[in-house]
Amino acid sequence: MYKLGEFKQLVRDFSDVADFLVVYIAEAHSTDGWAFANNIAIKRHRNLEERLSAARILVQEETLCPVVVDSMSDTTCVKYGAMPERLYILQAGKIIYKGEKGPWGYKPQEVHSFLQKMK
């Protein structure tokens, strides 16, 4: 979970200027979907309880910030174009940074640079 490590470093470095939140969305690499080797075994969520259960695995990794779970209708994922992952910065309810879609567009260093200017 190298990406989680980069995210956790952002939380450590910038918790004095930003509040962080993880929204757990549909599993991008489910074992019964598009899986790859050396990943945590999580099946595609069929109901909210399964999604909550999968999110608890993430919480065990100590994200250092709150984790919330998207609805089964994927409201947040669709609204923010978050599949499979994406970074945003909001200020006063407005998007002030919108990262590209991951995995290639997942760039914590861009968020670092952006937040550094807010210190």
Image: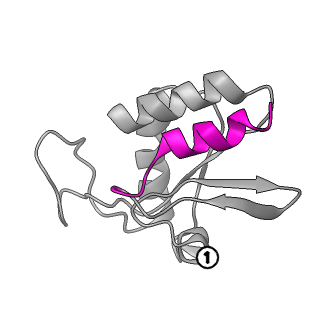
Residue 46 in magenta? no
Q: Seen from this angle, which residue lies furthest right?
A: 92
Residue at point 34% right, 32% down?
2
The local secondary structure at tag 1 comes to helix
Q: Give the residue number, with chain letter if any, for mark 1.
A: 79
**Which quadrant of the figure has residue 66?**
top right
**Which quadrant of the figure has residue 111?**
top right
Residue 104 in magenta? yes
Rendering coords of residue 94 (x, y %): 81, 64
Task: Judge whether 39 appears above or below 30 on screen.
Answer: above
Q: Amino acid at mark 1?
A: Lys
Rendering coords of residue 21 (x, y %): 66, 44
The N terminus is located in which quarter? top left
Q: Which contiguous range is marked in magenta?
A: 103-119
The C terminus is located in which quarter? top right
Residue at point 45% right, 38% down?
58
Q: Is residue 1 visible?
A: no
Of residues 115 and 26, the one drawn nearer to the viewer in this rendering: 115
- Characterize the local packing of mark 1: few (<14), some (14-19) or many (20 or more) Cα atoms within 10 angstroms: few
Q: Seen from this angle, which residue lies furthest left?
A: 37
Task: Judge whether 27 appears above or below 11 on screen.
Answer: below
Residue at point 37% right, 68% down?
46
Task: Judge whether 40 appears above or below 97 on screen.
Answer: above
37 relative position to 89: left or right? left
Q: Is residue 31 visible?
A: yes
Task: Judge whether 33 appears above or below 29 on screen.
Answer: below
Coloration mode: one colour
52 relative position to 16: left or right? left
63 relative position to 36: left or right? right
Residue at point 76% right, 56% down?
90
